[in-house]
Amino acid sequence: MSLELNQTHDPTLTSWVEGTDDPNTDFPIQNLPFGVYRKTNETEWRCGVAIGNSVFDLAGIDASGTDNLNWLAAAGPSTWHSLRRQLSAALSDKGKEGRMSKFLTQLSEIELTLPVQSRDYTDFFTSYDHAHNTVTLFRPDKPVSANFKWMPIAYHGRASSIMPSGSRIQRPLGQRLSPDRSIPVYEPSAFLDYEVELGVIAGPGNTAGEPISIENSEDHIFGLVLLNDWSARDIQGWESDPLGPFLSKNFATTISPWVVTLEALAPFRHPAVSRPSDDPQCLPHLTSEHNELRGHFDIEVEAWLTTSMSDTPFRLSKTSYKHSYWTPAQMVTHHSSNGCPLNPGDLLGTGTISGPTPEETGCLLERTYAKRKPIQLPGGEQRAALEDNDTVFLKAYCKNPDARRIGFGEASGHIVAARNIIAQ
C-alpha cells in the first residue's frame, strides 16, 4: 500500500482531547501511536492510542483486541489505514466528545507494557558512521568490512530479554579479559553502555521459503519504536571472536511502549542515503525507485542521562535516523531474502544510530573513544561508562515546516548493581 499524505496528516487538524494543542506534545492527533496499557489498580490490559495527555481505548471504535498488539500487526495495511481514519474522525470531531470521552484515561493514571510479544529479535548494523567509528577505535589500519555496503548486516538477539520502558537494568555478569591479565575472570561488567536505536515491528508475516520483495516490504512493517540495545563492551570484546556478540547483548533490550505507524511518519519520509560514487550500488533485490526516493525517515533521536547525583537530564547525543546507510524496507527484504519467515510482532533493531559528527554518536563507546575521553557532566561528574543508579532515556521526534511535530515518547532504563556472585 502506498502511504501517501491524506486528511489525517493535515497540520491544521485539531482534537478536542486535552493536551493536543501543545506544540511540543509527542501525541497530537496527527500521530495516533498504538500501545498496551492498564488503569492504575486494575489487572486488565487494554489496547489504545496515545492522544495528547491521554490514552484512548480502542473499544471506543469497536476495535479492541487482546492484551498485546500482535493481532493488529497481523491485520495488515488496509486495516491499519482504516483504523487510523476512524480514530482521526472520532478524536477530531467536537460533536463526538460527549460519547467518546468515556474511553479516555489520563497518561498519569495508567501503566504501560510491551506493545507486542516478539517471538524473534534481530539486531542490524545499518549506520555507516557507527561502523566507521568503531572500526577506527580498534583497527585504525583497516576499513569497514567489505560486506557492510552490500547488505544490512545483523545478528540474532534474544526476544526473552526485551523489556518495557522503565524497567530496571541489572548490571550483567560475564567473562572479561583485561589487558593486564592472561586469563579471563567472571565478574560484573565494568563497561556498560547504551545504544540509540529504532526498532521495526513486523506486520503480516511471510511463508517460509517466500522472500518479501523490496516493493512489498513496507506492507510488512507495522511501525517503529525506540530501542536501547544495552551492551557490556568488555564482555563483548572477549566473546565476539569469531561468532559475534552473545552474552554481552542478550541480558536486556528496552523498547518504548508506543508503536508509531509508517502512515503517521509519511510527512517525514526522506530519500535513501546517497551513496558515494566509489560505493557499490545495491543488488537489484535490495533497491526500488520508491526506496531510493522515499524509503528513509528523518527521525531525530536523542539519548539523555540522569545520575544519583543529578536528576537534571543531560543530553548525551542527538542525530537523525536519515543518516543510516540502509532503510527499514531493505532490512525486511534482506531478512527474508533466503526465505526466512517473519512473524507479526517480530522486532528488528536498526543498530546504533550515529551521525557524521562527534555529538551525533549513539553510544558511549564512540562518544568517549573507548573510555579514553570521558564525558564531563554538570556538577563535576564524568562518564566513560554507565554506573549503577544511572538512568538513560531515549527520545525521538519528527518535525518539518509542513507537518505537525510528532514523537515516540521515551524508552528508559535504570541501572542497578549486579547480583552478588558469592551468594550464588
Image (cartoon, rainbow, N blue to C red):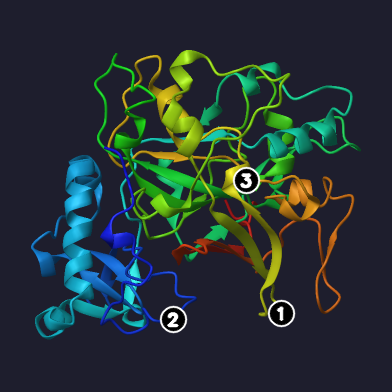
Mark 3 vs mark 1, foreground winner is: 3
Point 50% across, 31% down: residue: 292
- In the rendered structure, which disc, 3 or 1, sits on the residue that comes first in sequence? 1
Q: How far apart are the two marked residues, 2 and 1, measured between alpha carbons?
A: 28 Å
- Percent x, y for residue 357? 78, 49
Task: Give the quadrant of residue 170.
Answer: bottom right
- Amino acid on which the number 2 mark rests in the picture: Asp
Q: In front here: 82 or 4?
A: 4
Picture quadrant of residue 13 = bottom left
Relative height, residue 223 to residue 241 (above, below): below
**Residue 310's mark?**
1
Mark count: 3
Task: List x then y, in percent, for residue 358.
Answer: 80, 51
Task: Tell me if mark 1 has few (under 14), some (14-19) or many (20+) residues whose alpha carbon lies within 10 angstroms of its own.
Answer: some
**At numbered mark 2, what does the secondary structure look like: helix, strand or loop?**
loop
Q: Is residue 45 visible?
A: no
In primary-sequence order, the first of circles 3 and 2 is 2
Q: Residue at x 89, y 36 (%)?
A: 179
Vertical position of residue 385 compared to residue 391: above or below: above
Residue 171 relative to residue 376: left or right:
left
**Residue 333 percent location from the top left of the image:** 41, 25
**Residue beneath the point at 82% across and 52% down:** 368
User: Callout 3 environment at 10 Å: few (<14), some (14 to 19), or many (20+)?
Assistant: many
Residue to which mark 2 is pinned:
22
At label 3, which amino acid type do we have? Ile
Dot 3: element: loop
Q: Between disc 2 and disc 1, whose residue precedes?
A: 2
Measuring from the top left, give residue 202's x and y in whole percent.
34, 39
53 left or right of 124? left
| Residue that numbered label 3 is attached to | 353
Q: Are marks 2 and 1 in contact (CB under 8 Å)?
A: no
Q: Give the answer, above or below, for where 86 lies relative to 379.
A: above
